[in-house]
Amino acid sequence: MDIETFREYCLSLPGTTEGMKWGHLCFMIEEKMFFIIAIDEDNSFSIKCDPEEFDALTAREGIQQAHHMAKRQWIRVANLEVFNDTELKSRVEASRAMVLAKLSKKVQAKYV
């Protein structure tokens, strides 16, 4: 998936906004980041993951623990091609859902 198609997809998710943090493009819900991509570094990105999937994910080629992020909760992926389009979208939606689940019930209700 190319970066523009990916960006359009992320922004189509209810309540998603974009911004820049540490020189990277971030996608957020309620100002809480669920995806960060280094466009100037071959589109490597970090995404929140289920801690129970962490070991299986980091055993795959092109995936490792995300630096400077919560241990075993964020992975760094070499580029957008590591996952096929279906898995990439699924992982983005799961990351967004994990971040949303940490917000108040009132905030969550806006996106159901």
Image (spheres, rainbow, N blue to C red):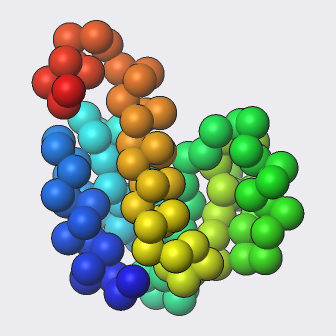
Q: Residue, x 20% and y 27% (percent of image)?
A: 112
The answer to whether residue 2 of the structure is visible from this angle is yes
In the rendered image, residue 74, in percent from the top left (x then y), is placed at: 64, 48
Q: Residue, x 39% and y 48% (percent of image)?
A: 93
The answer to whether residue 70 of the structure is visible from this angle is no
In the picture, measured across the screen, residue 100 lies left or right of residue 45, that is left
The answer to which quarter of the image holds residue 77 is bottom right
Q: Residue, x 36% and y 30% (percent of image)?
A: 100
In this rendered view, identify the residue nearer to me: 92 or 45: 92
Work out which residue is located at the far top of the displayed protein and give it: 105
In the picture, measured across the screen, residue 27 lies left or right of residue 61, that is left
In this rendered view, identify the residue nearer to me: 63 or 18: 63
In the rendered image, residue 21, in percent from the top left (x then y), is placed at: 39, 59
Work out which residue is located at the far front of the displayed protein and give it: 86
The answer to which quarter of the image holds residue 72 is top right
In the picture, measured across the screen, residue 15 lies left or right of residue 87, that is left
Is 31 rendered above or below residue 63?
Answer: above
The quarter in which the N terminus is drawn is: bottom left
In the picture, measured across the screen, residue 92 lies left or right of residue 48, that is left
Q: Residue, x 61% and y 78% (percent of image)?
A: 82
Total labels: the figure holds 0
In the rendered image, residue 58, in percent from the top left (x then y), is placed at: 79, 60
The answer to which quarter of the image holds residue 50 is top right
In the rendered image, residue 20, in percent from the top left (x then y), is placed at: 32, 63
Is 86 rendered above or below residue 29?
Answer: below
